[in-house]
């Protein structure tokens, strides 16, 4: 089979290359999936650069989220069936076949095609756990979403709107504003403007969903309300901001970390419950991944590079097979 491989750390377009590799055999507790589509995620960028929290030994296959068809089952797996259409997440899925842990595999929503389904699991689970499990977002509250036009940002906007919150989205350029609006943002502000003053003038934010870090986090700390909650999702800016305990004390706000993958390992039953709830919302048409573009398998490295360069809006999906 063909798989994308990272042979050294650096920019994705430089270090990623297609290579022939054997079709993997599913080990006990694993599922072999024939890949149909792989969603591009920012961790793919970090994996290529050697900056992700997990650093697989070189050479390795990137890709962390897919939709496909179950091709074979390892010993002890009875949660899915051969031929079933599924979604899954694991490092190493940017390939024509992928062997993944059975606990990472879920039924693909019938209402989503392969491209949309491949982009469904990580972004919506991250947004769901951030908004509901960590921040306990309530109807009538104001939700501030940084990077609101990105994959996880659009998911957070959609879920915030579905929860009855007033959603304010922050985007990097005016060209990205329509994506945030389409995802349910009631108001969209540009990162280059004085968005902190605008949010405070509008009454502040009760919950902040921040996958950016750096100055975006610093601004969120100024705009968050009394007893507000800032959910730290990631550091797409490349800058890990300091958390000022004195400032949190004075304003009575909370800073909440979210590493969604830990829930898969420590509380998988919550992940299954969230998937059921999210699938229902997808089937009802309330949420849908904002797939902006699909690209052929051969163009995967270029797609990851464009995400690294901040040139994308919504999701890019690599089509692997039918």
Image (cartoon, helix red, strand yellow):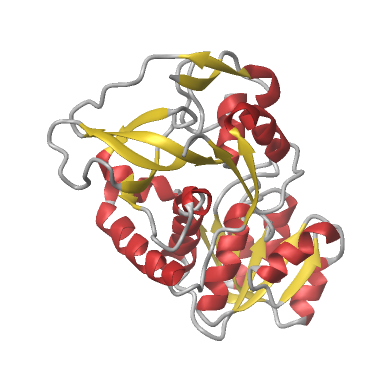
Q: In this view, does 276 lie above or below 66?
A: below
The outermost residue toward the right is 193
Instruction: Identify which residue is drawn at 65% across, 30% down.
Output: 299
The outermost residue toward the bottom is 140
User: As rendered, which of 321 and 252 lies closer to the eye?
Assistant: 321
The outermost residue toward the front is 322
* Residue 127 x %, y %: 50, 60
Total marks placed = 0
Instruction: Identify which residue is drawn at 56% across, 13% down.
Output: 7
* Residue 85 x %, y %: 34, 48
Q: Is residue 222 above or below residue 15?
A: below
61 to the left or right of 207: left
Q: Is residue 39 above or below residue 190?
A: above
Residue 222 in sight here: no
122 to the left or right of 46: left
Residue 185 in sight here: yes
* Residue 166 x %, y %: 63, 80
Q: Quadrant of residue 200?
A: bottom right
* Residue 66 x %, y %: 45, 41
The outermost residue toward the left is 76
Instruction: Identify which residue is drawn at 60% across, 41% down.
Output: 42
Which quarter of the rendered picture does the N terminus lie within? top left
Q: Is residue 308 above or below residue 243?
A: above
Q: In which quarter of the image is residue 111?
A: bottom left
Instruction: Identify which residue is drawn at 72% across, 37% down.
Output: 306
Q: In which quarter of the image is residue 302?
A: top right
């Amino acid at each position: 089979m063909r798989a994308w491989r990272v042979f050294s750390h650096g920019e994705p377009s430089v270090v990623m290359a297609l290579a022939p590799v054997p079709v993997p055999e599913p080990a006990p507790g694993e599922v072999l999936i024939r890949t149909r589509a792989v969603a591009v995620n920012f961790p793919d960028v970090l994996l290529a650069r050697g900056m992700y929290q997990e650093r697989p030994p070189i050479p390795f296959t990137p890709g962390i989220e897919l939709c496909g068809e179950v091709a074979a089952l390892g010993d002890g797996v009875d949660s899915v069936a051969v031929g079933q259409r599924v979604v899954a997440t694991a490092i190493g899925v940017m390939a024509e076949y992928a062997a993944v842990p059975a606990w990472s595999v879920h039924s693909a929503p019938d209402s989503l095609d392969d491209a949309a389904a491949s982009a469904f699991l990580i972004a919506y689970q991250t947004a769901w756990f951030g908004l509901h499990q960590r921040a306990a977002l309530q109807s009538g509250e104001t939700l501030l979403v940084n990077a609101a036009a990105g994959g996880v940002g659009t998911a957070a906007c959609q879920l915030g709107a579905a929860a009855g919150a007033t959603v304010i989205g922050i985007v990097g350029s005016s060209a990205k504003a329509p994506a945030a609006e389409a995802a349910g943002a009631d108001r969209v502000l540009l990162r280059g403007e004085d968005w902190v003053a605008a949010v405070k003038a509008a009454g502040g934010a009760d919950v902040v969903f921040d996958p950016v870090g750096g100055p975006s986090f610093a601004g969120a700390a100024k705009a968050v309300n009394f007893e507000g909650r800032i959910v730290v999702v990631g550091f797409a800016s490349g800058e890990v901001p300091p958390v000022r305990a004195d400032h949190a004390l004075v304003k009575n706000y909370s800073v909440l970390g979210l590493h969604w993958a830990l829930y898969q390992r420590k509380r998988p039953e919550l992940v299954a419950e969230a998937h059921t709830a999210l699938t229902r919302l997808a089937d009802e048409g309330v949420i849908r991944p904002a797939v902006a573009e699909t690209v052929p398998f051969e163009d995967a490295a270029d797609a990851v590079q464009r995400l690294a360069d901040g040139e994308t809006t919504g999701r890019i999906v690599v089509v692997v097979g039918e």
